[in-house]
Image (tube, helix red, strand yellow):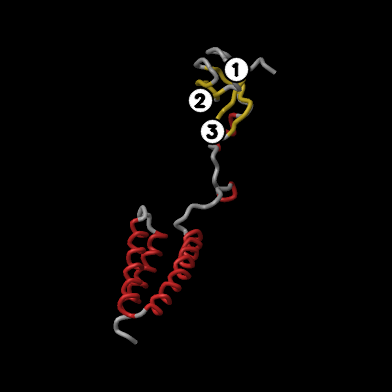
Amino acid sequence: MNEHIILPIILQLAGVLVVIAEIILPSGGILSILAAGVFGYSLFMVFSDISKTTGMVFLAADIILIPVLVIVGLKMLARSPATLRKTLSREEGVSSQSPELDDHLDAEGRAITDLRPAGMALINGKRTDVVTRGEYIDRDTEIRVTAVTGNQIVVRKKDDS
């Protein structure tokens, strides 16, 4: 093996490692520029010091190898524990609603601020942030919880049907 080809091969392998590092590490493109420089210098050395035929072989290998590495790297990254899950589900124990808010459904209370449509109410002896469906409710009006969605408690006047 020609001793002039060893350094370009090492540079090509280093370029591959830098491409893999770019996939894993957030670098803002700095590693991509470094990888392009390493590949470019390796190709320059092969074309100028060895031969154009060997340079074309290196170039063809880079054209095939780099996209394959990027695709494989992205698929590996997507399956790694470092990435976020695609969905969060109740089966996995994820809930966007506090469990104690379910107890408020159909509970009665009193508005302690004007509800325009949001405000504070006293429900089950606790100060609670509540909203109406758009209507204005005066302070000290008796209210009833009609819905609990997410972390939002929806109320209406108690005497409304």
The kind of residue on which mark 1 rests is: Glu
Q: Decide if residue 53 is on the left or right side of residue 88.
A: left
Q: Position of residue 87 (x, y in %)?
A: 56, 49
| Alpha carbon distance from label 1 to label 3 | 20 Å
The kind of residue on which mark 2 rests is: Asp
Q: Position of residue 138 (x, y in %)?
A: 55, 12
Mark 3 or mark 2, which is nearer the start of the sequence? 2
Q: Position of residue 128 (x, y in %)?
A: 51, 25
From this view, report whether residue 12 is shown above or below residue 92.
below
Number of the label disc, if any, that sits on residue 129: 2
Q: Decide if residue 67 is on the left or right side of residue 105.
A: left
Residue at 34% from the left image edge and 87% from the top image edge: 1
Number of the label disc, if any, that sits on residue 135: 1
| Alpha carbon distance from label 1 to label 2 | 16 Å
Q: SS for tag 3?
A: loop
Q: Nearer the viewer, mark 1 or mark 3?
A: 1
Could you say which quadrant of the image residue 152 lies in? Answer: top right
Q: Residues within 10 Å of mark 2 (few under 14, many from 20)?
A: some
Residue occupied by mark 3: 151
Residue at 53% from the left image edge and 37% from the top image edge: 98
Query: Residue lying farthest right?
Result: 161
Q: Are marks 1 and 2 in contact (CB under 8 Å)?
A: no
